[in-house]
Amino acid sequence: MPTYRDEAIVLRTHKLGESDRIVTMLTRRLGKVRAVGRGVRKTTSRFGARLEPAMVVDVQCYEGRSLDSVTQVVTLEPHGDRLARGYATWTATSAMLETCDRLTEEREPALQQFLLLRGALGSLAGGAHDCGLVLDAYLLRALAIAGYAPSFHDCAKCGAPGPHRAFHLAAGGVVCPLCRPPGSAAPAPATLELLAALLAGDWVVADASEERHRREGSGLVAAFLQWHLERGLRSLRLVER
């Protein structure tokens, strides 16, 4: 059978039979793949612990008719243990993994999504920034890569130069007074500045933000994400906001 080797991030797993597990991974070259880890639920498994969610691995598989099979795994970045030790970090990690799973398709290369997720997991594990900020930054950038980049300065409908105060999900971000639809939100200007900083990667502005603006921004990010995914994320409901 043809084999391949690639770097991968484990997105999720579920049981198969008595001792096997189906592993969904985002690979660097091939995109999202599903493969069977045979015997990985046994205590004697050689690489069962390496195929847990959030692990960054070098994996070798051989291609099957319906599912590939894992034959070798080497750990590259063991984030799983460090991220699972805290409730805040693990719930943020779970939301990232589920979002990535929803925004990618099987066997469609997604290098930008792979690099973004790998960097976000490393940032969470390193503890350089607040977990909520890292999560919101990841969600905004993942949506931008998928083609749903929000606007936090110029009008999302007509392009009129900002800053503008009204925010509308269906419009794609902030809107000017002429384009403002009924039911638009009116977040604080500092909240919009924070979200723009997270999207652009300006961590000096993001780290200096106030807690009330972070909470308001998180609500907007969650609503914007669920609007474009057309249904909510199960893991996002567990994140402390």
Image: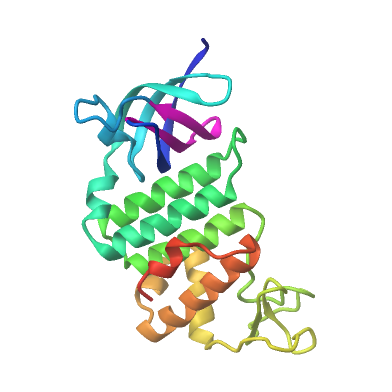
Horizontal and vertical percent position of residue 178: 80, 88
Q: Residue drawn at (38%, 70%), measured in percent from left and top?
A: 204
Name above or below for residue 41 compared with residue 127.
Answer: above
Q: Residue drawn at (51%, 10%), measured in percent from left and top?
A: 1
- Quarter holding residue 44: top left
Name above or below for residue 46 compared with residue 113.
Answer: above
Horizontal and vertical percent position of residue 60: 41, 21
Name above or below for residue 70 compared with residue 54.
Answer: above
Q: Was residue 104 drawn as part of the magenta stretch in this picture?
A: no
Q: Residue drawn at (60%, 75%), measured in percent from left and top?
A: 152
Q: Was residue 23 drawn as part of the magenta stretch in this picture?
A: yes
Horizontal and vertical percent position of residue 30: 55, 30
Q: How many marks?
A: 0
The image's colour scheme reads rainbow
**The C terminus, quarter of image:** bottom left
Q: Nearer the viewer, residue 194 or 241?
A: 241
Q: Nearer the viewer, residue 183 or 151?
A: 183
Name above or below for residue 77 compared with residue 226.
Answer: above
Horizontal and vertical percent position of residue 63: 52, 19
Q: Classify residue 199 as left or right of residue 239.
A: right
Residue extending farthest top = 1
Magenta region: 19-37
Q: Classify residue 103 as left or right of residue 62.
A: right
Q: Classify residue 168 as left or right of residue 211.
A: right
Q: Residue drawn at (41%, 41%), measured in percent from left and top?
A: 14
User: What kind of secondary structure does the magenta stretch mostly adopt?
Assistant: strand
- Quarter holding residue 171: bottom right
